[in-house]
Image: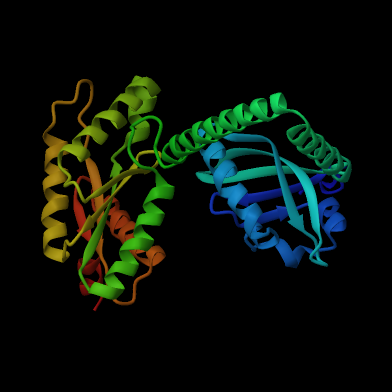
Amino acid sequence: MDERLKYAPCGYISITHEGIVTEVNQTFLDMMGYAQEDLVHKHIESIMSTANKLIFHSYFYPFINLDGHVEELYLRLKDRQGESIPYILNGRRYEMEGVEIIDCVLVQMGKRIDYELELRSAKKQMENAYWEKDQALVKLKQIHMEIEQKQQELMDINAVLVELSYTDKLTGLKNRRFVQEKLEEQIIRYGSTQEPFSICILDIDYFKKVNDTWGHQTGDEVLEKLADILISHSLHKDVVARFGGEEFVMILPDMDVHESKVKAENLRRAIANVAWEKINITVSIGVATVTPQDSDTTILKQADLALYASKENGRNRVTHIIDLNEKSL
């Protein structure tokens, strides 16, 4: 971390998309009484109360996924002694070498007590007016109705924001965050039912050449068309998502090794046989089927290894991780 940033007159924290702290400046550590090892590689929510975790999930993640930034989010964070310290948080998302990082600036709220006193005073005045005047009572009821209406509108907006936070803006498919949550659900379901599921990772072959030759607009059109093809070849229970860049993921519930191989091969052929406008497009596919030893992380890794093998062996092909494991025996 840059020396000036390390001692900047405000707190600075970098977190991953999953909320894991990767960097924190000395200013924030001094304000909160922590050492580097107390926070780095820990989840940022580890220093939040349950109420503030709820605020963080309701506002921070939807806005950071939708707009790429969050401004003036009020939070309370626990210092080393467990005291609740008020902060204003501004955050911005960016990618570096394909890795998503969220930088957060935290400014301590020194006048929070004054604000709370003002709110208490306003509440007292409202209560007095409520009991003293019938006209104020009627107006207060009207205000309550308006607040309820606004709360419902806010809930509706939050529901839309949550949906958008799970959606890839370009293709309309689900995104990486959604895939990770669904994989966790599938692993839990497998543990209780032993019903198999498989996962495919598809990567467009030589996609950089498409962008370099025809431009990023054509590249976007290819991504959108591929998304349509994947949707048209999926079942209602399948999860189809853009994992990032030119990579797509399909979660295939109730599909064993053989079925997933057939499914992946049919997809590969369908994509290769489509009449693409400017350039022939093919995909390499890696497939993995859940085993009792798998977690949501390991099955993704297995499918990724299979994808790498497809690319290494000439592209435009399907590889199931079980085939690689059998060859290594």
The residue lying toward the viewer, choosing from 237 and 234, is: 237
Relative vertical location of residue 313 with respect to residue 109 in this rendering, above or below: below
Residue drawn 66% across and 55% down?
Answer: 22
- Residue 215 visible (yes or no): no
Coordinates of residue 105 in the picture (x, y in percent)? 74, 42
The residue lying toward the viewer, choosing from 65 and 206, is: 65
The residue lying toward the viewer, choosing from 214 and 49, is: 49
Residue 88 horizontal side relative to residue 101, left or right: right
Residue drawn 66% across and 62% down?
Answer: 46
Coordinates of residue 180 in the picture (x, y in percent)? 40, 55
- Residue 42 visible (yes or no): yes
Identify the coloring.
rainbow
Coordinates of residue 24 in the picture (x, y in percent)? 75, 53
Relative vertical location of residue 197 with respect to residue 31 in this rendering, above or below: below
Residue drawn 79% across and 65% down?
Answer: 82
Relative vertical location of residue 49 with respect to residue 156 in this rendering, above or below: below
The residue lying toward the viewer, choosing from 183 and 110, is: 110
Quadrant (top left, top right, bottom left, bottom right) of the C terminus: bottom left
Q: Quadrant of residue 222?
A: top left
Coordinates of residue 5 in the picture (x, y in percent)? 81, 44
User: Which residue, as the protein is rendered here, is positioned at the far bottom?
Assistant: 329
Relative vertical location of residue 190 with respect to residue 226 in this rendering, above or below: below
Task: Tally the marks.
Answer: 0
Residue 42 horizontal side relative to residue 306, left or right: right
Residue 261 horizontal side relative to residue 164, left or right: left
Residue drawn 81% across and 52% down?
Answer: 28
